[in-house]
Image (cartoon, rainbow, N blue to C red):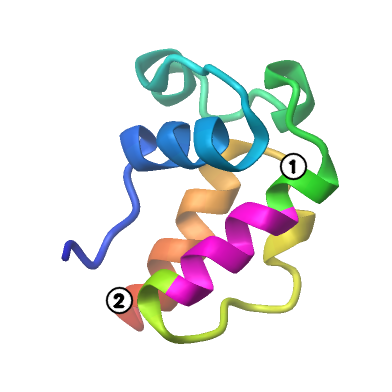
């Protein structure tokens, strides 16, 4: 299991958790685009946070579900997972 979340995995989680089809390369090329632009609301992001906590067996920071962009979310998640 990789210890870093990728844009591809985030895209898959958005599909499975919120029913949104998002092009991972589009997200990666515009990491500062708001989740709202992809149709992901705060409840959908909360579901992704819960799925990641279950997957990795550890809690994410309390403000993880308040991230506004994919880039911000990946930075927070990956910093938490790698402990860097």
Residue at 33% from the left image edge and 33% from the top image edge = 8
Q: Is 22 on the left or on the right of 45, as rendered?
A: left
Magenta: main secondary structure: helix
Quadrant housing the N terminus? bottom left
Q: Is 37 on the left or on the right of 80, as rendered?
A: right
Residue 33's label in the rendered image is none
Q: Is 29 on the left or on the right of 43, as rendered?
A: left
Residue at 58% from the left image edge and 48% from the top image edge = 72
Image: magenta residue range: 46-54
- State the CA–CA distance, disc 1 to disc 2: 21 Å
In this figure, which residue is indicated by the disc labeled 2?
82
Q: Is residue 51 magenta?
A: yes
On screen, residue 45 above or below 29:
below
In this figure, which residue is indicated by the disc labeled 1?
68
Residue at 18% from the left image edge and 62% from the top image edge = 2
52, 35: nearer the viewer: 52
The picture quadrant where one finds residue 36 is: top right
51, 26: nearer the viewer: 51
On screen, residue 75 above or below 71:
below
Pinpoint residue 31: horizontal percent, then vertical percent.
52, 29
């Amino acid at each position: 299991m990789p210890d870093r979340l990728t844009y591809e995995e985030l895209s898959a989680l958005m599909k499975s958790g919120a029913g949104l089809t998002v092009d991972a390369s589009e997200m990666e090329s515009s990491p500062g685009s708001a989740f709202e632009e992809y149709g992901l609301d705060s409840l959908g992001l909360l579901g992704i946070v819960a799925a990641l906590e279950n997957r990795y067996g550890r809690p994410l920071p309390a403000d993880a579900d308040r991230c506004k962009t994919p880039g911000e979310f990946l930075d927070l998640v990956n910093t938490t997972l790698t402990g860097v």
